[in-house]
């Protein structure tokens, strides 16, 4: 009898097919690329099924075989049933062609396609919960959200959640492991001088710069950041705002509205918009303080990057941020949504350079211990090995 296509010697590398629906590079996709880069190639032969675009290009540059597999949006689409069947069958063909030993869907939409593809091929899948259900289903139908969550936890061989906050959205008992996302901490230099970055963008050398990093989108809270900046300027006139990020998913109206809001608040001359940057490290180096004003997130890589750059973090005490920032040791967390309290915390830290430096050093140490990507790759590898 002929051996199956994906049969291999016990010590041979296993083929793992990662699945992501996105083409652009959001935080989840950057986390995926870091995992692809650092996964032990002596144990694994990683492949990627995705929609093409920058994600596919970056993965290919890492030497990862890419299989272009469109996974259309299903929410509010009359084509959803047809797209789901077509996409799942297409993904199943990719599984067979690759000879994948295991699938790892990396987003909510990816798992909706990957679960039936796994059933069609008999390959197990590990659901990597790297994002939240928010926005995937209309909020007025909570019963539909619960119905959609249930089968994926049951069908998955295991579930990896990138934070405890993500895990709480869908408890899976012993089938779930929390593995915080990570970054290559060694690539970030907390001693880097951000003066050149400031001068290139006509920011004062001696300004006290508070910054935010992320794609321009309401959930990232850049509008809140501008309102906080306006409050801070009332007591700290030498403060300066730095907004790093672009409308990478087409949120151009929101981006234009941010500039209009800065004009309305009378702070347009005290804030710099950089647009999308390939690497935020130099922008972080130019900051005196990192401010997080977004909605609750599964886990924001920018917070880890700010800590790796030795910056104290100030933000709302919600989402996964309390898992990242130790209040009073690496930053300051205030009640969720309280912009007045957040502005007061920012202003207080701007007046206290010694505490900013102390918390920045503690944040860097915490990033080295808990949030380095080599740890993430090692722990993910362990889960996949146990499943197989």
Image (cartoon, rainbow, N blue to C red):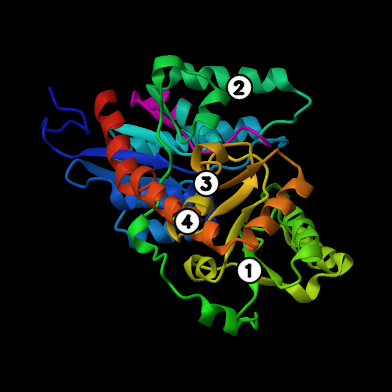
Given residues 255 and 339, the one toward you in this image is 339
Residue at which label 2 appears: 148
Left or right of 171 on screen, residue 368: left
Q: Residue at x 70, y 17 (%)?
A: 143
Q: Nearer the viewer, mark 2 or mark 1?
A: 1
x and y, in percent, of residue 121 in the image: 36, 26
Q: In whole angstroms, how far apart are the C-alphas of marks 4 and 1? A: 17 Å
Task: Give residue 191's position: percent from left, percent from top.
Answer: 41, 69
Q: In this rendering, is residue 301 above or below 89? A: below
Q: Which residues are magenta?
A: 116-135
Report the mark closest to the observer, 3 or 1: 1
Q: What is the number of the mark on residue 45?
A: none
Q: CA distance from mark 3 to mark 2?
A: 21 Å
x, y percent for residue 129: 49, 33
Quadrant containing the C terminus is top left
Q: Quadrant for residue 103, please give it.
A: top left
Q: Please give left or right for residue 179 compared with residue 27 in the image.
A: left
Could you tell me if residue 256 is visible in this image?
no
Residue picked out by circle 1:
209
Of 128 and 235, the residue lying toward us: 235
| Disc 2/disc 4 C-alpha distance (Å) | 46 Å
Q: Residue at x 39, y 45 (%)?
A: 371
Separation (CA) of disc 3 from disc 4: 47 Å
């Amino acid at each position: 009898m002929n051996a199956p296509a994906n049969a291999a010697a016990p010590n041979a590398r296993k083929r793992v097919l990662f699945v992501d629906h996105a083409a652009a590079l959001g935080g989840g996709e950057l986390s995926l690329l870091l995992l692809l880069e650092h996964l032990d190639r002596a144990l694994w032969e990683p492949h990627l099924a995705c929609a093409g675009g920058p994600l596919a290009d970056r993965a290919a540059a890492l030497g990862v075989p890419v299989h272009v597999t469109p996974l259309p949006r299903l929410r509010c689409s009359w084509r959803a049933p047809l797209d789901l069947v077509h996409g799942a069958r297409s993904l199943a063909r990719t599984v067979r062609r690759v000879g994948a030993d295991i699938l790892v869907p990396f987003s909510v939409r990816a798992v909706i396609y990957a679960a039936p593809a796994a059933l069609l091929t008999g390959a197990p899948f590990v659901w990597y919960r790297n994002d939240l259900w928010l926005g995937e289903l209309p909020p007025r139908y909570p019963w539909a959200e619960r119905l959609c969550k249930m089968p994926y936890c049951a069908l998955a061989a295991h579930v990896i959640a990138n934070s405890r906050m993500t895990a709480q959205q869908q408890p899976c008992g012993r089938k779930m492991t929390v593995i915080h996302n990570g970054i290559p901490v060694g690539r970030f230099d907390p001693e880097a001088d951000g003066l050149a970055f400031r001068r290139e963008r006509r920011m004062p050398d001696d300004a006290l710069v508070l910054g935010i990093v992320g794609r321009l989108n309401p959930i990232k809270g850049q509008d809140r950041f501008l309102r906080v900046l306006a409050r801070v300027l009332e007591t700290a006139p030498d403060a300066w705002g730095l907004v790093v990020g672009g409308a990478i998913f087409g949120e151009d109206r929101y981006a234009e509205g941010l500039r209009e809001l800065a004009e309305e608040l009378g702070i347009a001359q005290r804030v710099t918009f950089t647009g999308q940057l390939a690497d935020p490290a130099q922008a972080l180096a130019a900051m005196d303080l990192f401010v997080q004003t977004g909605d609750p997130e599964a886990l924001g890589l920018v917070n880890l990057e700010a800590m790796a750059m030795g910056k104290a973090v100030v933000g709302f005490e919600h989402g996964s941020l309390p898992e990242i920032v130790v209040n009073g040791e690496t930053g300051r967390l205030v009640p969720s949504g309280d912009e007045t309290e957040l502005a007061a915390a920012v202003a207080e830290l701007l007046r206290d350079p010694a505490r900013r430096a102390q918390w920045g050093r503690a944040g860097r140490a915490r990033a080295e211990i808990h949030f380095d990507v080599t740890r993430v790759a090692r722990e993910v590898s362990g889960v996949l090995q146990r499943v197989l």
